[in-house]
Image (tube, helix red, strand yellow):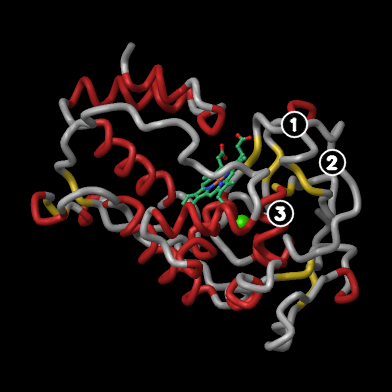
Amino acid sequence: MKYHAIELAYPASRGLENITFALKRVADKHKVSYGDIIQFAGAVALSNCPGSPRLQFLAGRPEAKAPSPPYLIPSPRDTVDKILTRMADAGFTVDDTIALLAAHSVGRQEVIDFTVAGLPLDSTPGRFDSQFYLEVLLRGTNYPGAGQNKTMQAKSPSSHQFRLTSDAALARAPITACRWQSFINHQSRLTSAFRNAMVKLANNGQNTDDLIDCSDIIPFSEFWDGPAELPYGKVLADLEHPCSEQPFPALSSAKRSP
Ligand code: HEM
Ligand SMILES: [Ca+2]
C-alpha cells in the first residue's frame, strides 16, 4: 500500500482525502516531492488570507522513506498535557504550539460534527487575525449543531462558530492561558510568532542545508492590522479571563451583526 493510503486511514487524517489527491496530481506532474508540495500549497493558500505572514518556503525535501506511525498527531480530545508533551517531543515549545493555533483563525470543521460541516472556528475565517484567540475565551453556551462527537467539540458561544475541545482547554490551562491572551489585539506579535513556529513545522526532520530557499515565489497577503472585536451581541462579562497575571486587552465591539 502507498504511504498516503496508509496515513489517510489514521483518524487525524479524516477530511484530508480531497486535498491529498489534488496535491498528489500536481506533485507527480511537476516531479516535486510530496513534502515540498504540501509546504508550498500551505504557504500559497495562507497568502489568500489578509493579515497572514508570508511563510518561508524551502524546496528540495526528499520523498518519505516510510509512512508515519499512527497517533502522532494530537486529537481534539487529548488533554493539554498530552498535546504539549507530544509537541515538545517534536521540537515545539509551549509558546510555539499556542502560536501555531493561529491556523485555526482561518479554519473550519468538516468531520467532527456533520450537521454543521463547514462551520468556521472563529467569526472571520477569511482573515488571519487574533479574533480566534478572543472568541475561544467567550463562555461556551451551546453546541451549534447536533453535538456529535462531544469529546472533540466544546460548547460554542455562537451558532455560527465551532469550538474544538483542545482549543477551549489550551485557552484556559494555567500553563498556556497568558500566552493565549497575549495574542489578542497584537497582530504583529501573532504573525511573527506563527511564522517562526511554521519555519520549524515546515522543516521538521529535514536538513535545511540541503534545501533551497524559494520563499520569493510565495505571494504576500493583503495587509491587515485591525483590532479584535467583541462579536455582535457579546459583552465583556461573556469573556472568561484565565490569565490572572495580565489585564485583559482593551476591546471594541463589532458594529455589524454576525
Ligand atoms: C492542538 C493541536 C491541534 C488539534 C487537536 C487540531 C485539530 C483540528 C481539527 C479537529 C480540525 C477540524 C477538522 C475537520 O473537521 O475538518 C482542525 C482544523 C484545522 N487545523 Fe487544526 N489542530 C491542531 C493544530 C493545528 C496546527 C498546528 C495547524 C497548522 C499550523 C492546524 C491547522 C488547521 C487548519 C488550517 C484547519 C482548517 C481546515 C479546513 O478549513 O478545512 N491545526 N484542526
Ligand atoms: Ca480569523
Where 60 falls versus 67 (above or below)?
below
Q: Residue at x 39, y 31 (%)?
A: 69
Which labelled disc corresponds to residue 144?
A: 2
Residue 89: image location, x then y, percent: 40, 55
Disc 3 residue: CB within 8 Å of ligand 2 = yes
The answer to whether the residue bearing label 2 lies less than 8 angstroms from the nearest atom of ligand 1 is no
Q: Kindly report the distance in space between the C-alpha atoms of the residues bearing marks 1 and 3.
A: 18 Å
Examine the rendered structure and indicate whether residue 49 appears above or below residue 181. above
Question: Marks 2 and 1, Cα distance to the nearest angstrom?
Answer: 9 Å
Q: Secondary structure at mark 3?
A: loop
Amino acid at circle 1: Asp
Residue that carries the numbered disc 1 in the rendered image? 113
Looking at the image, tell me whether mark 3 or mark 2 is earlier in sequence order: 3
Give SS at disc 1: loop
Q: Amino acid at mark 3?
A: Ser
Q: Is the C-beta separation of discs 2 and 1 under 8 Å?
A: yes
Give the class, few, some or many, for how many residues have Cα within 10 Å of label 2's Cα (few <14, many ≥20): many
| Quadrant of res 213 | bottom left
User: Which residue is found at the position 30% from the left and 43% from the top?
Assistant: 40
* Residue nearer the viewer, 226 or 82: 82
Q: Position of residue 129 (x, y in %)?
A: 57, 64
Q: Tell me the mark number nearer the camera, choosing from 1 and 3.
A: 1
